[in-house]
Image (spheres, grey):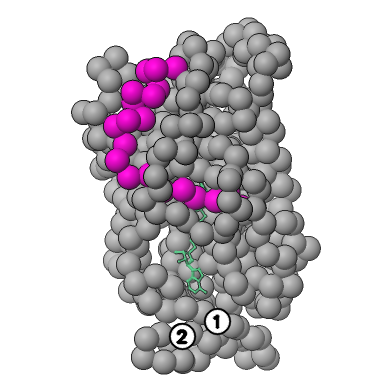
Amino acid sequence: MAISRSVLISGGGIAGLTAALCLSKNGYRVEVFERSETYDNLGAGIQLSANALRILDELDVGRLLRLSSTSPQAIRITSAYTGGKISEVPLGADAIIRFGLPYICIHRADLHQALLTACANDPDIRINMNSVVTDCVSHPNGVSALVLKKSGMRTVRGKLFVSADGIHSKIRKEIFDAPAARHTGFEAWRAMIPAEKAPARFALEFTHLIWGRGKHAVLYPVRNGRYLNVVIVTKSRKKTDEVRKKEDPKHLKFKTFFWNSKFKILLNGASDWSVWPILETPPSKSWHNGPMVMIGDAAHGMEPYAAQGAAMAIEDAKVLADSLAEEKEISKALSNFQKTRSSRVKKIAKLARTNRQLYHMGFPFSTVRNIGMAFMSGKSLLERQAWIYDWRAKR
Ligand SMILES: Cc1cc2nc3c(=O)[nH]c(=O)nc-3n(C[C@H](O)[C@H](O)[C@H](O)COP(=O)(O)OP(=O)(O)OC[C@H]3O[C@@H](n4cnc5c(N)ncnc54)[C@H](O)[C@@H]3O)c2cc1C
């Protein structure tokens, strides 16, 4: 590979694969190194709003996503205890009319498959699975990264190094002197419920946001409506960084004991629960160091309550490629990249934190909240999201 236009990416997640596509479109040759052997730990859903979908459409990935995603009519907010509706944020046709694109819900494996297919069709992108990037150094000719494979260690060289290795990134500290991710004290219980196991009157055409004291749930259909993706966020008993697979649901049953029976019946339809710690990365001063840069969760892992972490990773990928196209001096381009991104990402992370506080209110604050929400029209609730969903890259 010619070094002068070559980029090395650590991590083949949403940020890494989107960055590979954006950079290749701008004339770079890209090598992606992904630690996993296969993408098998992706049994969960993801919601994508117009700001992310606009970029994926430009990359010809959106077309593939439409094949398996669903587009909910609205976000229906209900009380966990009474089961009654608190409010509704219109999506469906309203989102398309307002933002030009739908709001979609998709299984993560389908999103990854769509990104991988687009990468596989691009002769300038090479993806190496089972390859762990253990270090990277810069020098006058660019960067050299150390990659550990089953066959042994090898050194790869390029002009630019992108750390897209997620919230657990081990190299953030060494390369960018960035602090390690921290546990927020919450965890997400995740499961898929086959649609036929949902009670007959449970509206599958909505994203459901269920608010309880100190916890909440998000449910939405994926895989053309064949499954309901369920996420329940509660306080953590154990502050471990590991994902716990096949967790015994008895603790969850205890936590949701006072929930309305219609939700409890629904949750009984899930067989396998996994528990994901909710982590965040403390802000780091610089996302770049010479010709090396962090994007996505590695740079700014945030709480997931604005449903925008992946969208921010996708926006990062686009802005990074555009910054490099506009400014030939790499370190200056990376500095422009961070300047363009940091205030938006900070604002979204702050919103996510505020959302958690809003969702988890207990009595009497929850009553005041619910009355306030009832006075807001659906249109105004959707309009409050406009600064997020209507974002467009400059180029
Ligand atoms: C419960 C929950 C719900 C969420 N819901 C939404 C949502 O609805 N919408 C939304 O936009 N976001 C959502 N998010 C956030 C979203 O999942 C993340 O922001 C997104 O996955 C970040 O993408 P990434 O590529 O930066 O990191 P990751 O997806 O974590 O990818 C990093 C990749 O790097 C690989 N890797 C790690 N270290 C190395 C190494 N040394 N060498 C090589 N490879 C390495 C990993 O194996 C992984 O494949 C949610 C998060 C959670 C926890």
> Relative to the observer, which residue lies in front, 15 or 255?
255
Q: Few, some or many C-alpha atoms within 10 Å of disc 2 (few <14, some 14-19, many ≥20)?
A: some
Residue 183 screen position, x and y as percent: 64, 53
Disc 1 + disc 2, Cβ < 8 Å: yes
- Amino acid type shown at disc 2: Leu
Q: Give the position of the N terminus as an image quadrant.
A: bottom left
As drawn, 241 above or below 346? below
Q: Few, some or many C-alpha atoms within 10 Å of disc 1 (few <14, some 14-19, many ≥20)?
A: some
List the single residue furthest toward the left: 196
Residue 341 appears in the picture as rendered: yes
Q: Would you say residue 263 sits in the magenta stretch? A: yes
As drawn, 301 above or below 292? above
Give the residues in magenta: 260-280
Residue 311 screen position, x and y as percent: 52, 47
User: Which SS class for mark 1?
Assistant: strand
Residue 355 appears in the picture as rendered: no
Q: Does the beta carbon at disc 1 come under 8 Å from ligand 1?
A: yes
Residue 57 screen position, x and y as percent: 40, 47
Residue 66 screen position, x and y as percent: 30, 41
Q: In which quarter of the image is residue 164?
A: bottom right
> Relative to the observer, which residue lies in front, 26 or 371?
371
Could you tell me which residue is drawn at 32 percent across and 67 percent down? Answer: 38
Dot 2 corresponds to which residue? 148
Separation (CA) of disc 1 from disc 2: 7 Å
Dot 1 corresponds to which residue? 134
As drawn, 118 above or below 47? below
99 left or right of 299 in image = left
- Amino acid type shown at disc 1: Thr
Could you tell me which residue is drawn at 43 percent across and 72 percent down? Answer: 34
As drawn, 22 above or below 329? above
Could you tell me which residue is drawn at 55 percent across and 45 percent down? Answer: 187
Instruction: Please give the label number shown on residue 300.
Output: none
